[in-house]
Amino acid sequence: MCTYALSQLTEETLVVLVTLHEEGGTSREWEKMQIALTPEERVHLNYIKSDVHRDHLPIMNEATIWGRAIYPLLRLAEHGHIQAWAGVPLKARYPTFELEGEADGALAPSVGGRIQPPYLVVHEAKRGINAPNPQFQLYGEMLAAAWLNWETDAKPEQQIFGCYTITDDWTFVLGTVADIETEKPTLHIKFSPRYNGTADAEHIVQILKSIVSKHANINT
C-alpha cells in the first residue's frame, strides 16, 4: 500500500485513487447558507476589515496573510466546543492507499484541548507562476478528514467541507465521499463562487457559521 503526501497530490494521482466528480455550484445555493452575525461579531468583523484594508496583502508572505486575514474570520465562526485550528495533522488509511500531511487550518471540535476530526479544512494556496493548483491538495485533505469522521460514525457517505484561499480570496468546496471501504472511493465536489475577504467578509463568516450549525445539528 502506497502512502501519498497531501502536499504532493496532483490531479493525475487523485483520479487513479478515487472516482472524482466535479461540478460548479450556483450563487443561490451558497447564499442559502447564511446565519446572521451577532452585534458583537459585527464589531469584530468591522475591525478585521478595517485592519486588512490598510494592509498591502499582495506583497505579504503567506504566513502573515493567514494570521491577519484568514484565521481571524475562521475564529468568528467558533461556537461552544467548536474551534478554529491551524496546522492540523491529517492521516487516513483507505483500503488501497494512505494519505498523510497537514491542513493549514480547520474548524473542528475540541475535547480537553485536543482536536477531533475536522469537518471543514482550509488550504492556503502558494503564490507564484510555478505554484501548484490548490484544489487537489485540498481534495486530499478533505478525503483524509472524511475518513477520520467515518472512523467515528461509520456513515456510508461522509459530507465534508473545504476551502482554499488565494491571498484573501476564498472558494468553498462541498465534498461527499462514498464507497469508503472499496478499492476506489468516490469523491463528489461542488464549488462555491469566489468571495473576497474584504468585500465579502460578512458573507464568508455567514457561510462558516452555517457550516458550524450543520455540524452541530448532525451531532445533536
Image (cartoon, rainbow, N blue to C red):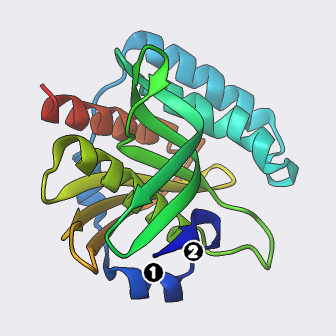
Residue position marked by numbered label 2 in the rendering: 9
- Looking at the image, the residue that sits furthest to the top is 40
186 lies above or below 217? below
- Looking at the image, the residue that sits furthest to the front is 1
- Cα gap from disc 2 to disc 1, whole angstroms: 7 Å
Residue 29 image offset from top left, x and y in percent: 23, 57
Residue position marked by numbered label 1 in the rendering: 14
> Which image quadrant is residue 77 in?
top left
Residue 92 image offset from top left, x and y in percent: 42, 57
The residue at the point 31 percent across, 68 percent down is 190
The reply to whether dot 2 and dot 1 touch (C-beta < 8 Å) is yes
Label disc, if present, on residue 186 of the rendered structure: none
30 lies above or below 69? below
Question: Could you tell which of marks 2 and 1 lies nearer the N-terminus?
Answer: 2
Residue 158 image offset from top left, x and y in percent: 22, 55
Secondary structure beneath dot 1 equals helix
Question: Local crowd at mark 2 within 10 Å, few (<14), some, or many (≥20)?
Answer: many
Which quarter of the figure is the N terminus placed in? bottom left
- Looking at the image, the residue that sits furthest to the right is 59
Residue type pointed to by label 1: Leu
